[in-house]
Amino acid sequence: MPDYEICYLKDDGSLAGKFAANCSTEMQAKILAHAMRLDSTRGIEVWSGSQLVYRRPDEINDRRHVR
């Protein structure tokens, strides 16, 4: 089962929180990321190892935290 890291970003692009999840598919990880999103966050990133597999909104380009 792949491991995913789900990150939540504030308006300024800084990390608001993150958690690891065991999901059977990338789609499941994306759905979980949206379901667990904090109201105070703007962005969502889903990582599989060192690969970014999902980002919302798309225009978040400035990563302020390092993986």
Image: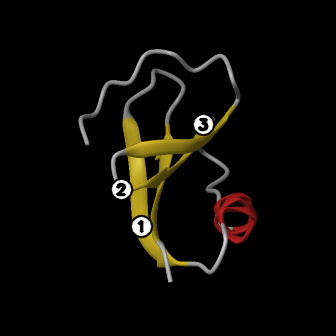
In x, y percent, where is residue 47? Answer: 46, 51
**Badge 3 local density, few (<14 within 10 Å), some, or many (20+)?**
many
In x, y percent, where is residue 37? Answer: 65, 57
Q: CA distance from mark 1 to mark 2?
A: 13 Å
Q: Residue at x 66, y 63 (%)?
A: 26
Residue tagged by mark 2?
49
Residue tagged by mark 1?
19
Say whether disc 3 or disc 2 marks the residue closer to the N-terminus.
3
Q: Residue at x 65, y 16 (%)?
A: 59
Q: Residue at x 64, y 61 (%)?
A: 33
Residue projecting furthest to the left: 66
Q: Is residue 56 above or below residue 51?
A: above
Element assignment for label 3? strand
**Badge 2 local density, few (<14 within 10 Å), some, or many (20+)?**
few
Q: In the displayed structure, does residue 60 sit left or right of residue 15?
A: right
27 or 34, nearer to the observer: 27
In x, y percent, where is residue 53? Answer: 57, 45
Residue tagged by mark 3?
43
User: How is the rendered protein coloured?
Assistant: secondary structure
Q: CA distance from mark 1 to mark 3?
A: 14 Å
Q: Disc 2 residue type?
A: Gly
